Image: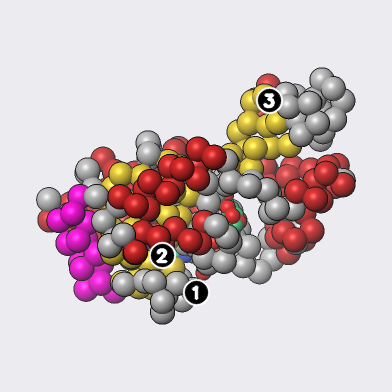
Amino acid sequence: MQTLIEKAAQRLAGERRGAAMTGAGVSVESGIPDFRSRGGLWTRFPPEEYATIQAFRRDPEKVWRMLAEMEKTLDASSPNPGHRALAELETLGVLEAVVTQNIDGLHSRAGSRGVVEFHGSHRTLTCLWCGNACKREEVRQLPVPPRCSCGKVLKPDVVFFGETIPEKALHDAARVADTCRVLLVAGTSAEVYPANQLPSRAKRRGALIVEINVAPTLLTDSVTDIFIEGKAGEALPLLAEAVKRLL
Ligand code: NAD
Ligand code: ZN
């Protein structure tokens, strides 16, 4: 693993135009289960049943039972060494952006500034029926599910299955993929479209693809140039250390 980390660090330090794309795996060590973990949230609330926009429109009260549990998990979580290492790589001047599929806000809390929240965020909510928008804080005191002044149930601004990606996030992520020279792909199964298109897009534009995951994924044998098998919370800090030594 050390040789592969060294190789990736050399390219990052040499090019100084890196970016990262992250998935649920980088937050597993913060106590937030990914879709593939046994037990936990997603076993009791299967995403195909609770995380689709059709489910929300049909029965928002039911979907809020999952959202309320998810919020409890998010409230209890804090950034781990993997999030902090990505923030440090940005401070070192070798990483321009983190495109994340996560809605937990942990990259920003760890200090990353160039964060593209591809699947939105749970910090704001919108009413699908009248278009009203508000901050989560503003409706914290309301009983769950929180309701809009029009009486309908509010939806957090996270992208549910069946919804389109916010225009700005799509645009920003495409720019990142087109301009980075090294892309760190960490903790994602690369099974969720269209986020999973970004690594091959970056590769076509000549970027080196460095994948960090505890197990091989759909990308490993096709798109990935360097596969670092390990936990994001362990491999990313080693990578940041190696870059620091080279600068
Ligand atoms: P996923 O659940 O499909 O895959 C997670 C990947 O992370 C797997 O490949 C797994 O092997 C890997 N992994 C697990 N622990 C790891 C660790 N410690 N270090 C490195 N890799 C590890 O996640 P996805 O690809 O992000 O797609 C799922 C969708 O669900 C996304 O849209 C995501 O936004 C959403 N989601 C978000 C959160 C969150 O915000 N934290 C949590 C669950 C799901
Ligand atoms: Zn409304």
Q: Amino acid at mark 1?
A: Leu
Q: Which residues are magenta?
A: 1-16
> In whole angstroms, how far apart are the C-alphas of marks 3 and 1?
37 Å
Residue 51 placement (x, y as % from top left): 73, 53
Task: Tell me which residue sits at (73%, 37%) in the image.
Answer: 155
Furthest residue toward front: 204
Q: Residue at x 58, y 46 (%)?
A: 165
Q: Which mark is residue 133?
A: 3
Which numbered disc flags the more N-terminal residue, 2 or 3?
A: 3
Q: Residue at x 66, y 69 (%)?
A: 38
- At label 3, the amino acid type is Ala
Q: Nearer the viewer, mark 2 or mark 3?
A: 2
CB under 8 Å between callouts 2 and 3?
no
Q: Is residue 48 above or below residue 75?
A: below
Q: Amino acid at mark 2?
A: Ser
Q: Main secondary structure of the magenta part?
A: helix
223 displayed left or right of 33: left
Which residue was labeled with disc 1? 218
Q: Residue at x 50, y 38 (%)?
A: 168
Q: Position of residue 224 (x, y in %)?
A: 37, 71
On the rendering, which quadrant does ligand 1 occupy?
bottom right
Q: Nearer the viewer, residue 156 or 206?
A: 206
Residue 181 percent across, percent down from the top left: 26, 56
- Which badge, 2 or 1, is on the more N-terminal residue? 2
- The quarter of the image holding the N terminus is bottom left
Would the CB of label 1 be found within 8 Å of ligand 1? Answer: no
Residue 63 part of the magenta segment: no
Which residue in the protein does label 2 denote? 200
For numbered disc 2, what is the local secondary structure? Answer: helix
| Marks 2 and 1, how far apart at CA | 11 Å
User: Can see residue 138?
Assistant: yes
State if disc 1 and disc 2 touch (CB < 8 Å).
no
